[in-house]
Amino acid sequence: MTLPQEKIYTIEDIYALPDGERAELIDGRMYMMAPPSTIHQKISWKLHQEIGNHITSMGGKCDVYAAPFAVFLDKDGSDYVEPDISVICDKQKIDDKGCKGPPDWIIEIVSPSSQQMDYGIKLFKYRTAGVREYWIVNPLKQTITVYDLEKEQETKQYSFDDTVPVCIYEDLAINISDLLS
């Protein structure tokens, strides 16, 4: 007796989802996404604003995008994610459908249902794809976990009350508590 084969999903399956449904595609598996909470949205908006203002004030060449924004981590499109925040410095990667290749900096705001994805599967995928910096912001624990993937330095954990230095911008540090006050 043969075991049933698990369906391998493609980007076409993502595009075929009904309006209002969102999912990510990693290694042929589709992961449905729940709607974000109010605090999730507030943190996302404030981070997007803070990073965008910094880039603009410094005359930077990078762009910052908030979810929903498509990121195709690899050339064949088999890994499709929608990070909460994506900072992309190579404008050649951006087209009408999103980002083709790894962003320079990704921020995920974790929810109880996304912890395994954000701390495990996505960390591995982002590291192997070539993302330079990865933050996991956890509103429940009020922590920020920072991975400097470019320099492969040790992981650092901060509280919302800490001022967190940004690895790809030496002149930027962010305090989440200040942003939310």
Image: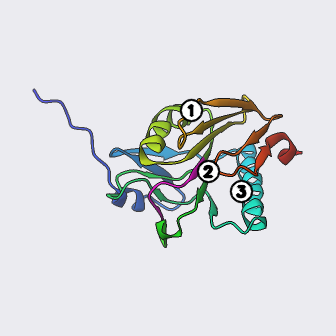
Instruction: Read off the magenta span.
Output: 98-106
Question: Marks 1 and 2: CB-CB under 8 Å?
Answer: no
Instruction: Based on the picture, tell me whether residue 109 belongs to the magenta stretch.
Output: no
The residue closer to the viewer here, 9 or 59, is 59
Q: CA distance from mark 3 to mark 1?
A: 21 Å
Horizontal and vertical percent position of residue 95: 48, 71
Within 10 Å of the Cα at label 1, are there few (<14), some (14-19), or many (20+) other Cα atoms?
some
Residue identifier under label 2: 84
The residue closer to the viewer here, 118 or 6, is 118
Location of the C terminus by quadrant is top right
Please name the residue shown 38% across and 54% down the image: 74
Q: Specify the quadrant of the image occupied by residue 153.
A: top right
Q: CA distance from mark 2 to mark 3?
A: 9 Å
Residue 120 is left or right of residue 135, and the answer is left
Q: How is the image coloured?
A: rainbow
Question: Which tag is nearer the camera, tag 3 or tag 1?
Answer: 3
Horizontal and vertical percent position of residue 14: 41, 57
Question: Marks 3 and 1: CB-CB under 8 Å?
Answer: no
Residue identifier under label 1: 115
Q: Specify the quadrant of the image occupied by residue 3.
A: top left
Horizontal and vertical percent position of residue 137: 67, 38
Within 10 Å of the Cα at label 2, are there few (<14), some (14-19), or many (20+) other Cα atoms?
many
- Helix, strand, or loop for circle 1? helix
Q: Specify the quadrant of the image occupied by residue 55.
A: bottom right
Location of the N terminus by quadrant is top left
Question: Marks 2 and 3: CB-CB under 8 Å?
Answer: no
Instruction: Based on the picture, tell me whether residue 103 belongs to the magenta stretch.
Output: yes
The amino acid type, in three-letter code, at marker 1 is Gln
- Helix, strand, or loop for circle 3? helix
Residue 154 is left or right of residue 138, and the answer is left
Residue identifier under label 3: 48
